[in-house]
Amino acid sequence: MSKTSTFVRMQSDGTLVRIKPDGTEETVMVTPPTPLGDEAITAAACRDPDAQPLIEADLVRMVQVSLVGYAVGGAFLNLAYYDVPYNLLAALVVTRTLLEKHLRSAGPAVAPGAQQALQTVPRSQTSVR
């Protein structure tokens, strides 16, 4: 064993014991993680600059890239992938509907920028005909 290695073993009752270099065992006191609610998870994600939540614009860009990839490689795909563009369109429609519902229930103080962005494209122009 090196001086920096730590070996831990779980006993049959679930407790953890650290095995010391001389072979003796020492119980490791581990505090269980505290379960987080939805608000705490969202707050933690918003504080982390590398893990910002996705917004509707990100989904739109991802769908655009998916459609371009489908169009480029579509000639080499079989009919099993025929419905991919329709699935992407359905994901966009469901996302917009959920976003509008959330913004209506949250009120204008929560996300005025998002409400303004939704008002710039009327629903009649985005519906499938």
Image: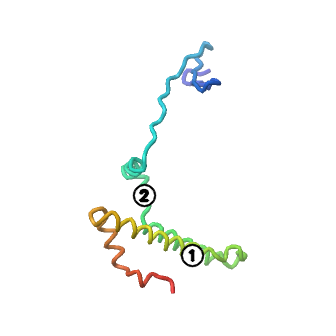
Name which of mark 2 and mark 1 comes first in the sequence: 2
Residue at horizontal 33 percent and vertical 63 percent from the top: 106
Q: Are marks 2 and 1 in contact (CB under 8 Å)?
A: no
Residue at the disc numbered 2: 53
Q: Classify mark 2: helix, strand or loop.
A: loop
Residue at horizontal 43 percent and vertical 43 percent from the top: 36
Who is closer to the viewer here, 126 or 103?
103
Report the mark closest to the observer, 2 or 1: 2
State the image coordinates of residue 98 (x, y, percent, origin top left).
Answer: 44, 67
Residue at horizontal 55 percent and vertical 20 percent from the top: 3
| Amino acid carrying mark 2 in the image | Pro
Q: Quadrant of residue 118?
A: bottom left
State the image coordinates of residue 90 (x, y, percent, origin top left).
Answer: 54, 73
Who is closer to the viewer here, 53 or 107?
107
| Amino acid carrying mark 1 in the image | Val
Residue at horizontal 47 percent and vertical 36 percent from the top: 33
Above or below for 72 versus 45: below
Residue at the disc numbered 1: 68
**Which residue ends up furthest to the front in the rendered image?**
105
Q: Classify mark 1: helix, strand or loop.
A: helix
Q: CA distance from mark 2 to mark 1?
A: 24 Å
Above or below for 35 versus 120: above
State the image coordinates of residue 114 (x, y, percent, origin top left).
Answer: 34, 68
State the image coordinates of residue 31 (x, y, percent, origin top left).
Answer: 47, 29
In the picture, which quadrant includes the N terminus? top right
Q: Quadrant of residue 58?
A: bottom left
> Are there few (<14), some (14-19), or many (20+) residues within 10 Å of tag 1?
few
